[in-house]
Amino acid sequence: MILSEDQRMIVGVARAFSKDVLLPRYQSLDDHDSRIPQETLRALGELGLIAPGNKEEHGGIGLDSATVGLVLEALAEGDFNITYIALIGSLTSQILSHHAAPGLAREWVPGIVRGEHMVGLALTEPQGGSDAANIQFSARAIDGGYLLNGEKTSITLAHCADAFVVFGRTGTRGQGASGVSAFLVKGDSEGLSRTRFKDMGGRVIGRGSLFFDDVFVPSEYRIGDEGDAFKTIMHGFDFTRALLGLQCVGAAQASLRETWQYTRERAAFGRPIIENQGVSFPLAEAEGRLEAARQLCLYALQLRDAGLPHSAEAAMCKWIAPEAAVEVIHRCLITHGHYGWSIEFPHQQRLRDVIGMEIGDGGEQIMKIIISKIRGAKVDLNESN
């Protein structure tokens, strides 16, 4: 992808912030009790790096989707976890801008984009897992709004988000994906309680469960039409799957760059180890794998910008890029020898953080189901292409 001057400028801003601000703090935030620094959020917002793809009237700078992906890739080179704030901010602000009542969007979107509010996404349930349409969480209509009851689990930012986009069933369970509505629920709502998990990676952004006990949500806090959330909102996940792919690529690229440097400086048997093909060839292969994953993600985002179908490509991004990134970071760790095994170096944390993306937001099996359904339905042996 050949960048324009404006694209190079904004990606350069992201890369400088990543190197100067995010990377020096990355490992210090790897703690079960750590919290995202407010000054970091505000700085991201001031630089226009949260939801930069939003139109100007929605607080963004109107970047195309592919450039948004490159911005997130650059941020992830410094801190894989903090980059999630820019990603989820892109998704939730667009959900609210496009589907919420104008007053609700005006109340929340500017704060998301400025880094003043964090809004999480609450979709997964204990019994549902990857079966996102099998929502049992109850959203019962009453006078003036809805009463929400049930549990959402494996929710990123569960411990710290100011609000959540919550999916609940307003129709019957037999309706499947239909009959599901979305709501914006404030984090301090009466009847809402939270837990925080102790995870192997992604610790600063956290993950946990949300418990709803007759949580009242006003009607104006419903997002979109009742019973229509899957059809109107879920397509946004194609966007974030490609962004997540580039987020993983960015983290792996940072480790790969550090490892090339190490192999030039580390000597064994009287010469730099980079001169050994057993060292340099696996790193060259890693470069190829990351570049292939990067181009796939950019292609999916360019299809999105062109208004073309890209669900299969987005699913490929979500499966291939995390897998490639994990293998590349692992190779970098091993190449560093006993230095790589030390927690003083960032490879081990990047590895733990990126592994989470092989699980969250749809594992590889789900992505392959999506690809199979889309591509399998289009197969025609009479077509040459």
Image (spheres, rainbow, N blue to C red):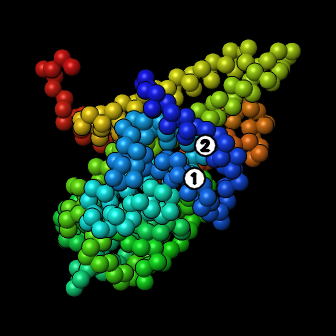
Q: Are marks 1 and 2 in contact (CB under 8 Å)?
A: yes
The answer to whether residue 22 is above or below residue 12 is: below
Say which quadrant the N terminus sits in. Answer: top left
Q: Quadrant of residue 69?
A: top left
User: Which of the two residues, 385 or 129, is positioned nearer the viewer here?
Assistant: 385
Question: Is residue 154 among the parts visible in the rendering?
Answer: no
Question: Is residue 148 among the parts visible in the rendering?
Answer: yes
Residue 131 falls left or right of residue 196: left
**What percent of the width, then of the height, locates residue 120?**
44, 62
**What percent of the width, then of the height, locates residue 31?**
67, 59
Q: Which mark is residue 62?
A: none
Residue 167 falls left or right of residue 67: left
Amino acid beneath label 2: Phe
Say which quadrant the C terminus sits in. Answer: top left
User: Which of the two residues, 244 or 225, is positioned nearer the viewer here?
Assistant: 225
Numbered disc 1: secondary structure: helix
Disc tally is: 2
Q: Quadrant of residue 68?
A: top left
The answer to whether residue 163 is above or below residue 326 is: below
Q: Give me the residue at 57% from left, 53% from top.
A: 43
Amino acid beneath label 1: Ala
The answer to whether residue 3 is above or below residue 176 is: above
- Residue matched to label 1: 43
Q: Give me the residue at 27% from left, 56% from top.
A: 98
Residue 363 falls left or right of residue 340: left
**What percent of the width, then of the height, locates residue 148?**
33, 77
User: Which of the two residues, 9 or 151, is positioned nearer the viewer here?
Assistant: 9
Q: Which mark is residue 17?
A: 2
User: From mark 1 to mark 2, how far is it between C-alphas?
Assistant: 9 Å
